[in-house]
Structure formats: structure tokens, C-alpha cells
Image (cartoon, grey):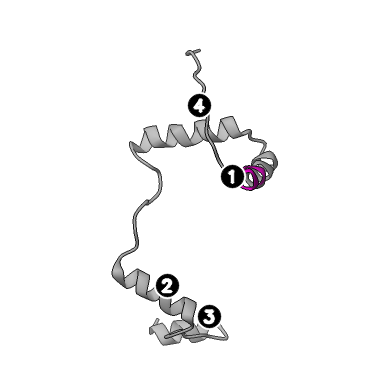
Amino acid sequence: MSQSSTISVRTEKGLKEKVGKILHELGLSHSTAINMYYRLILAERGIPFDVKLPNKTTRKAVEDLEKGKNVKRFDTAEELFQDLGI
């Protein structure tokens, strides 16, 4: 077994508690979850999910959604698919 090392991380107390409950349900400790994350970074040779700023189109769409502008609502999935032409 290789030598271990300690990492000290600051995070919001509430965030740690909420994540801790989820990890407990999964049967994982914070240390195990962080080690899993580190192994994914190593395997992927980078962060294992997209970390980027939204482009102008996405920002506009989010702003419109928050303001309720240009929002279509459908009562059924079939109505949505029909609107999309599929």
C-alpha cells in the first residue's frame, strides 16, 4: 500500500452536512468520495465534467426563462414532440 497524504479543505458547513447524508446513504465517507473523484480526474486526465462559462445564447435563454419570456409550455410530451416536429 502506498503512503497516504492529508488534504485539508474548507467548505460550507451546510454543504458538508447535506453531502455527508447522501454519502452515508451510499455507504461512503467523505474521504472515499474525494478519492473516487481524484481517481476520475486521473483516469480522465482532467475534471470529469464540463467546467465552462455559458455562451451568449445560453445566457440569453436562461435570462428569458427566469423572466418567463419566450417560454413554451406543453400539457403532454406528445404536444412537445409535435411542436419539435418529431
Q: Are marks 4 and 1 in contact (CB under 8 Å)?
A: no
Q: Earlier in the sequence, mark 2 or mark 1?
A: 1
SS state under label 3: helix
Question: Which callout, 1 or 3, points to the residue nearer the camera?
Answer: 1
**What's the amino acid at mark 2?**
Val
Cα distance in 3D space between marks 4 and 1: 16 Å
Residue drawn at (50%, 12%), measured in percent from left and top? 1
**Residue 64 point in image, percent of width and height:** 42, 79
**Residue 69 point in image, percent of width and height:** 44, 85
Cα distance in 3D space between marks 4 and 3: 47 Å
User: How many residues crowd around disc 2 within 10 Å: few (fewer than 14), some, or many (20 or more)?
Assistant: some
Disc 4 target residue: 7
Cα distance in 3D space between marks 4 and 2: 36 Å
Q: Earlier in the sequence, mark 2 or mark 3?
A: 2
Mark seen at residue 62 = 2
Q: Is residue 58 above or below residue 18?
A: below
Cα distance in 3D space between marks 1 and 3: 39 Å
Within the image, what quadrant is residue 16 found in?
top right
Disc 3 target residue: 77
**What's the amino acid at mark 1?**
Glu
